[in-house]
């Protein structure tokens, strides 16, 4: 009964983390701001760290199957 929600949440986390990481890398390569009004280094670091954490949460959900 708990496999369905774990698969759904794992997929949501993985898709969001991958999209956030791809968006952050694309913005950084184009030398465009990731967040308005924030240091470019800080915004790329925080967004990249958040993406990696979300991807790790998605992987953790899949290990619970």
Image (tube, rainbow, N blue to C red):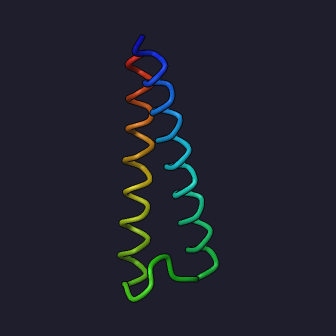
In this orientation, which residue lies closer to the viewer: 59 or 9? 9
Answer above or below: position of 63 versus 37: above
Answer above or below: position of 55 versus 60: below
Q: Residue furthest top?
A: 1
- Place residue 23 in its image quadrant: bottom right
- Place residue 32 in its image quadrant: bottom right
Q: In this view, does 47 lie to the left or right of 30?
A: left
Q: Which residue is drawn at 44% across and 53% down?
A: 51
For the N terminus, the quadrant is: top left
Answer above or below: position of 12 versus 22: above
Answer above or below: position of 31 versus 49: below
Q: Residue furthest front?
A: 1
Q: In this view, does 61 lie to the left or right of 26?
A: left
Q: Residue at x 49, y 49 (%)?
A: 17
Q: How many marks?
A: 0
**Residue 2 locus on image (x, y percent):** 40, 15
In this orientation, which residue lies closer to the viewer: 29 or 16? 16
Q: Residue furthest bottom?
A: 37
**Residue 63 locus on image (x, y percent):** 41, 21
For the C terminus, the quadrant is: top left
**Residue 9 locus on image (x, y percent):** 45, 33
Q: Residue at x 51, y 82 (%)?
A: 33
**Residue 46 locus on image (x, y percent):** 36, 66
Q: Which residue is drawn at 56% across and 44% down?
A: 15
């Amino acid at each position: 009964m708990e496999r369905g929600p774990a698969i759904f949440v794992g997929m949501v986390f993985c898709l969001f983390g991958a999209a956030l990481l791809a968006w952050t890398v694309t913005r950084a390569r184009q030398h465009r701001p990731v967040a308005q009004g924030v240091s470019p280094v800080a915004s790329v670091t925080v967004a990249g760290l958040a993406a990696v954490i979300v991807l790790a949460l998605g992987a953790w959900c899949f290990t619970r199957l």
